[in-house]
Image (cartoon, rainbow, N blue to C red):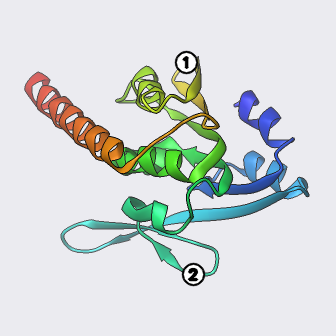
Amino acid sequence: MKEIFEGLKTVKGKVVCICVENDKILKILAKNKDADVLTINRIIKKSFFFKNKKLFMPDGKKIKIKKLRKAFKKKTVDYIICDYNAIEDYFKYIIGNTVDINSKTLYIYGTATLTDPKDIAKRFERYNAEVKLTVNNEDFVIIVNNEKSKTNWFKNKLYFIKDTCHNIGDLISASLVS
């Protein structure tokens, strides 16, 4: 987490925090006058059959996690900070969206319970992004430099299908083991 704290002290530009509830990160961003911070929170509404997971912007506007790219234009956000544990269910959507809208650095932090942080880092390396992974016990921090990353519609769809098949394989193997 020290890498995130040191990096956030010097940010300049537009910063989007997706499901970040860490008080220390929010205090550092509040003190930084050069950062234009937008926090997007996730509110879970339970119904009888399923949980409805939507993101809400500060003005009350709803954003679907799957369609985060529609809320921002391509390469307009300088820094993105994500809590992996809050967006784990929809992470395959977040990968392509963050590479499209991010122009500088993406910070992902969380605890690795079921997934390997190396696997998460490899998913960003496919887009020719520079990835730095730090693991302490079960906590991890992934810093993705998206300045040279390139993506297109076909590549996003191909990797989405690959990630979906990988997730299905993980579910089948987990059910066979248990």
Image position, residue 35 (x, y; %): 82, 56
Q: Position of residue 154 (x, y in %)?
A: 31, 46
- Rendered location of residue 105, percent (x, y): 66, 39
Q: For the N terminus, give its image quadrant.
A: top right
In this orientation, which residue lies closer to the viewer: 108 or 52? Answer: 108
- Tell me whether the residue at label 1 lies in contact with that at label 2, contact meaning CB atoms closer than 8 angstroms: no
Q: Is residue 98 above or below residue 166?
A: below
Mark 1 or 2, which is nearer the eye?
A: 2
Mark number displayed over residue 147: none
Q: Quadrant of residue 39?
A: bottom right
Q: Quadrant of residue 120?
A: top left
Against 137, is 26 above or below? Answer: below
Mark 2, secondary structure of its residue: loop
Give whichever of 37, 97 is nearer the camera: 97
Residue type (three-letter) at the residue carrying disc 2: Gly
Residue type at tag 1: Asn
**How many marks are shown on the rendered structure?**
2
According to the picture, the residue beneath numbered tag 2 turns out to be 60
**Dot 1 alpha-carbon crowd within 10 angstroms: few under 14, some 14 to 19, many 20 or more:** few
Q: Residue at x 16, y 37 (%)?
A: 168
Query: Furthest residue to the left?
Result: 176
First in sequence: mark 1 vs mark 2: 2
Question: Who's the residue at 34% across and 41% down the image?
Answer: 155
**Drawn side of residue 128 relative to residue 53, left or right:** right
Helix or strand or loop: what does disc 1 sit on?
loop
Considering depth in this image, is 148 or 112 the residue closer to the camera? 148
Pick the quarter of the image with the C terminus. Answer: top left
Q: Which residue is mark 1?
A: 137
Q: Is residue 92 left or right of residue 128?
A: left
Residue at x 59% of width, y 25% of height: 130
